[in-house]
C-alpha cells in the first residue's frame, strides 16, 4: 500500500512540463495590457488574442483538460460504514449492539499513472489546438484586413482619377468656347467620371463584407469602428530556408495534436492492461459488545475486532482484451492522422510560398516598370493634349492605365501580406527576422516533450508488466 501511495503521488517530468506550459500562457494572457486599436494589422491581431470567442473557447478547453490531470491520479475514496443492530445478537460475552467499519481500496500504481498520463496528453492536445487556433486566427484576420486596406487605396485612386478627369473636363469646356473641342468630347469625359464615381460607390458593398469578416475574426461588435492604417505592408524576406519551413510545417501544432492524442490512447491502453489485475481492498471492523447477562463470564463485554481483504476477480478479461485492441487501433489511427496532416501542411506551404513569390514578383514589376511607365505616359499625353498633339482618347486611356496600375500595385501588396500570413499558418508559427536558431529550438521542444512522455510510458509499461506477472 505504501508503495502504491508513493508511486501514485510521484508526478513525472512530462506532466510537470505540461502543467507549467499552461500556467505560463495563462499568466501571460492575464498580465498582458489591453491593446489599443490603432488601425494596424498587428493591433487587430493583439485585440483578437484577447477578444476572439474561438480563441477563448480553445483556451478554456485547454484549461479544462489541464484541470482533469490531477483528478485522474487521485486515490480511491476510503469507505466508512456504521450499523446498529435493532435486535442485538446475544453471545456468551454479551450482546453485539453496533459496529463500525472502514474499507480502503488499493489502487495499482500503473493504473493511476496511466490515467494521469492520458489526461496529461489530452491537455497537451488542447494546448496544441490553442496554438494552432492562434496562428490560423492571424491568417483569418489577414484575409479580411488587407482587402480592406486595398479597398481604401482603391478609393483614393478613384478619387484621384475623378479629380484628373474634372481637370480635363474644364480644359475641354474652355476649348469648346474657342472651337478647339466638341461637346461630344466633353460628354465622353463626363461619362468616364460617372463610371469612376460608380466604381467608387460600389466599393462600399465589398467593404461591408470584409468588415463583417474582420469583426467576426477579431470578436468586435458592429458598433465598433474599424480604422485601417494607410501604411504599406512590409515586403520582408523569409528568415529561414525553404527546407526549414518544411520541417516546421511537418511539426506544426495540429500535427502535434494527433501525436498527443496518440500518447493519450497509448496511456489508455496501459490503463486497460492494468485493469486486468484483481481489485484489492483492506478492511477493518469494530463491533461493540455489551455486558454479559451471566455474572463472572470470562471476556465479559469484550469488543470484537476484524480485519479482512476483498479481492475483485477479473472475470471480464475478454472484454478488456477487446478494449485494449481498440486503444491500440486508436494509437495507429492518430499516428496516421498526424502523417496526413503533415502532408497537407506541406502542400499548404508550397501553395503559400508560390503565392508569396508571385505577389513579390508583381510588386517589383509595378514598382520598377509598370508604374513608372504609366506616370511617364500620363505626363507626356497630358502635355501633348494641351498643345494639341494628342487626342482625347489618348488622355482617357492614359488616365485609366494610371489608375488601374495603381490599384493592381496595391492589390499585389495586399496579396503579399495575405500570402505571408498563409505561410505562417502553414508552418504553425509567426515569422520574423529573429534568430532562426531560436525557432529551431522551439521546433525541437515538442519532440523533446514527446520523448519525455515516451520514456515515462515505457517505464510505466514495464512496471505494469511486472505487476501482471506478480
Image (cartoon, grey):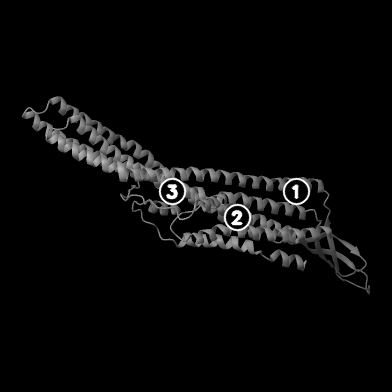
Q: Report how far apart the C-alphas of labels 2 and 1 lie in the structure.
A: 22 Å
Hey, which residue is sitting farthest left in the picture? 178
Mark 2 residue element: helix
Nearest-to-viewer mark from 3 and 2: 3
- The residue that disc 3 covers is 420
The x and y percentages for residue 47 are 41, 53
Q: Which of 426 and 82 is in front in this view?
A: 426
Callout 3 environment at 10 Å: few (<14), some (14 to 19), or many (20+)? many
- The residue that disc 1 covers is 324
Rendered view: 190 above or below 69? above
Q: Which of 181 and 137 is in front in this view?
A: 181
Q: Report how far apart the C-alphas of labels 3 and 1 lie in the structure.
A: 45 Å
Nearest-to-viewer mark from 3 and 1: 3
Question: Do tag 3 and tag 1 residues touch (Cβ < 8 Å)?
Answer: no
Mark sitting earlier along the chain (3/1)? 1
On the rendered image, what quadrant is the C terminus found in? bottom right
Q: Nearer the viewer, residue 313 or 400?
A: 400
- Is residue 106 among what the camera can see? no
- The residue that disc 2 covers is 123
* Residue at figure coordinates x 24%, y 32% from the top left: 397
Mark 1 residue element: helix
Mark sitting earlier along the chain (2/1)? 2
Q: Nearer the viewer, residue 338 or 132?
A: 338
Amino acid at each position: 500500500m505504501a508503495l502504491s501511495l508513493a508511486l501514485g503521488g510521484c508526478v513525472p517530468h512530462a506532466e510537470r512540463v505540461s502543467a507549467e506550459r499552461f500556467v505560463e500562457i495563462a499568466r501571460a494572457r492575464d498580465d498582458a495590457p489591453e491593446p489599443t486599436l490603432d488601425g494596424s494589422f498587428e493591433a487587430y491581431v493583439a485585440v483578437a488574442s484577447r477578444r476572439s470567442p474561438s480563441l477563448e473557447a480553445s483556451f478554456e478547453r485547454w484549461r479544462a483538460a489541464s484541470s482533469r490531470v490531477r483528478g485522474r491520479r487521485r486515490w480511491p475514496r476510503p469507505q466508512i460504514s456504521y450499523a446498529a443492530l435493532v435486535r442485538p445478537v446475544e453471545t456468551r460475552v454479551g450482546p453485539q449492539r453496533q459496529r463500525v467499519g472502514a474499507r480502503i481500496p488499493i489502487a495499482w500504481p500503473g493504473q493511476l499513472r496511466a490515467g494521469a498520463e492520458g489526461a496529461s496528453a489530452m491537455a497537451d492536445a488542447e494546448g496544441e489546438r490553442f496554438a494552432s487556433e492562434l496562428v490560423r486566427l492571424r491568417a483569418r484576420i489577414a484575409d479580411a484586413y488587407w482587402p480592406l486596406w486595398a479597398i481604401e487605396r482603391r478609393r483614393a485612386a478613384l478619387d484621384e482619377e475623378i479629380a484628373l478627369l474634372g481637370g480635363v473636363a474644364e480644359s475641354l469646356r474652355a476649348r469648346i468656347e474657342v472651337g478647339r473641342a466638341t461637346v461630344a468630347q466633353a460628354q465622353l469625359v463626363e461619362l468616364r467620371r460617372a463610371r469612376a464615381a460608380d466604381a467608387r460607390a460600389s466599393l462600399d458593398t465589398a467593404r461591408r463584407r470584409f468588415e463583417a469578416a474582420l469583426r467576426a475574426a477579431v470578436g468586435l461588435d458592429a458598433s465598433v469602428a474599424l480604422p485601417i492604417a494607410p501604411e504599406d505592408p512590409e515586403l520582408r524576406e523569409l528568415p529561414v530556408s525553404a527546407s526549414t519551413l518544411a520541417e516546421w510545417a511537418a511539426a506544426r501544432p495540429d500535427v502535434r495534436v494527433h501525436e498527443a492524442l496518440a500518447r493519450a490512447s497509448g496511456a489508455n491502453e496501459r490503463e486497460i492492461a492494468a485493469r486486468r489485475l484483481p481489485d484489492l481492498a483492506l478492511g477493518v471492523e469494530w463491533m461493540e459488545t455489551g455486558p454479559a447477562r451471566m455474572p463472572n463470564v470470562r471476556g465479559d463485554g469484550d469488543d470484537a475486532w476484524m480485519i479482512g481483504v476483498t479481492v475483485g476477480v477479473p472475470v471480464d478479461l475478454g472484454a478488456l482484451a477487446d478494449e485494449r485492441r481498440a486503444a491500440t487501433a486508436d494509437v495507429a489511427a492518430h499516428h496516421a492522422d498526424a502523417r496526413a496532416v503533415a502532408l497537407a501542411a506541406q502542400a499548404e506551404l508550397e501553395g503559400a510560398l508560390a503565392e508569396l513569390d508571385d505577389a513579390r514578383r508583381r510588386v517589383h514589376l509595378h514598382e520598377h516598370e509598370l508604374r513608372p511607365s504609366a506616370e511617364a505616359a500620363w505626363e507626356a499625353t497630358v502635355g501633348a493634349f494641351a498643345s494639341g498633339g494628342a487626342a482625347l482618347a489618348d488622355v482617357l486611356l492614359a488616365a485609366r492605365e494610371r489608375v488601374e496600375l495603381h490599384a493592381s500595385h496595391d492589390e499585389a501588396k495586399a496579396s503579399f501580406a495575405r500570402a505571408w500570413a498563409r505561410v505562417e499558418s502553414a508552418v504553425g508559427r509567426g515569422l520574423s527576422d529573429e534568430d532562426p536558431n531560436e525557432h529551431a529550438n522551439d521546433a525541437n521542444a515538442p519532440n523533446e516533450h514527446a520523448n519525455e512522455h515516451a520514456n515515462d510510458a515505457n517505464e510505466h509499461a514495464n512496471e505494469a508488466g511486472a505487476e501482471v506477472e506478480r
